[in-house]
Amino acid sequence: MREISLENVVDTEGKVPRWTFCIFGATRSGKTTFAASFPRVAFLSDVTESGYESLRGISDEFLFEPGVQPIVLGIDKMNDMVLAREMLAPHIRSGMVTTVAIDSATFYADLYLNYLFELQGANVNNLKAYGALGVHLRDLRVKWHQMGCNVIWLCLPQDPDEDRPNGLPMIPGKEAGKFGASCDYLLFSRHDRFKQGNEITDRFEMHSKPYGKYIAGCRRSDGVPELPNPLVNSTYTQMIQAMGYDVDAYRASLPAYQRPKLIVPQVAPPPVSAANATPQQVAKPAVKPHIPTAARPVPASNGVRPAVQPTVTRRPAVPAGRSGNNNS
C-alpha cells in the first residue's frame, strides 16, 4: 500500500505525463492514424482485422519524431499479449517505447471469448465464459496501465438502441463501461467526407465530450487542461500544444532513439494435470507472435536496420473547414 498525493502537478515545460485513452468509433474514422501520431508507439494489432494496414507509409507530418515509425506486433494467439508485454517492458523502461496501442480491444475480446468457448467444448456456459472474459480483460487493463507509458485502447462502437441508451466501446459484457471509466480520456471518433467544387475533403473528429448519444469525457481533476472539442484532423502534437505543453521541450527530454530489437521471451505454459487436461489444454511450446510486414524493415547490405520508408501520404494534418452538413 502507498499514499497517493492529491497535489495537482502539471509540468508543461518538461516531460509530458503518461495518459491512458479509450478511443472508439466506426471503421476508418481515424483511430489508428491518430494513435500513430503519439510518441514512440508500439501497436498490438489483431492480425485478422489488419488495422495496421493504415500505418503503411504514414508520412512524417503525422509522426511525433520524423522518421521514427511505429512498431507493430500482430496478435493472433492467446499467448501473444503476454509475450508482447514481456518483449516491450525493457524498451518502455529505456524510453524507446513510450506509447502502446491495442488495436483493437474489440477484436481481441472476440478472440479470447472464442478461445473460452473452444475450451469448454460441448459444455458451453455463456455466463461462465463472459465472466472469465471480464476477469481477463480487467487483469490485462491493470497490467498495461502499470507499465509507465501512454496506453491507447482502440475499439469499434456499440451503437445505442432500445436496450442501451448510450453508445459505448464495443467490448462484450460489462467491460464496455469499465474501459472508459478506467482511462484518463474516453474519446469518440467520427469521419465526414464532403465535396467542395472538384475537391473532396475529409474531416476526422475526436470528441472529448458527449456527441449525441455517444459518451466521451475526461476524468482528470479540476485545473488540468481539457482537450479541445472536437479535435479536427489532429495529431498528438497538436493536442498537447492546445493543452499548453511545450512540444520542443518534451522532444528534447527523450533519450536518443534507437529502434528496439525485439526478443521473444521464453514463457513456459502453466502446468496442466494429465488426468484433467482437455485437448485444448495440452501444453504446447511458446509460439512467436506474428509481426506484420509493415513492421519489418528491409536489412541493408551492411547489416544496418533502416527505418521503414514512407510510401503513402495519409490525410492532411491541417484542420479542414467545417462543412454545412457536419452535425458536430
Image: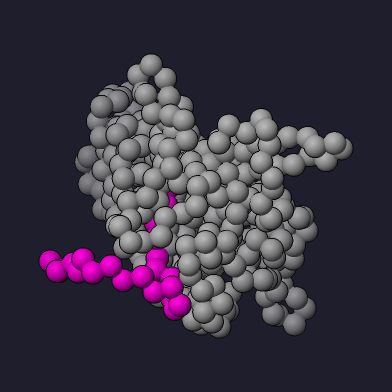
- Residue at 43% across, 73% down: 12
* Number of marks in the rendered image: 0
Give left or right: position of 184 versus 127: right
Q: Is residue 94 above or below residue 117?
A: below
- Main secondary structure type of the part rendered in magenta: loop
| Region in magenta | 1-22
- Residue at 32% across, 32% down: 173
Q: Is residue 267 above or below residue 200?
A: below
Q: Could you tell me if residue 306 is visible in this image?
A: yes
Q: Nearer the viewer, residue 53 or 209?
A: 209
Residue 130: give x, y in percent of width and height: 30, 32
- Residue at 21% across, 41% down: 275
Residue lying at the far right of the rendered structure: 198
Residue 16: give x, y in percent of width and height: 43, 71
Colour option used? one colour
- Residue at 71% across, 61% down: 59
> Which quadrant of the structure image shows residue 293?
bottom right
Residue lying at the far top of the rendered structure: 162
Quick check: is 265 in the magenta stretch?
no
Q: Could you tell me if residue 44 is visible in this image?
A: no
The quadrant in which the N terminus is found is bottom left
Q: Is residue 100 above or below residue 153?
A: below
Residue 163: give x, y in percent of width and height: 35, 19
Residue 98: give x, y in percent of width and height: 47, 68
The quadrant in which the C terminus is found is top right
Q: Nearer the viewer, residue 323 or 64?
A: 323
> Which quadrant of the structure image shows residue 105?
top left
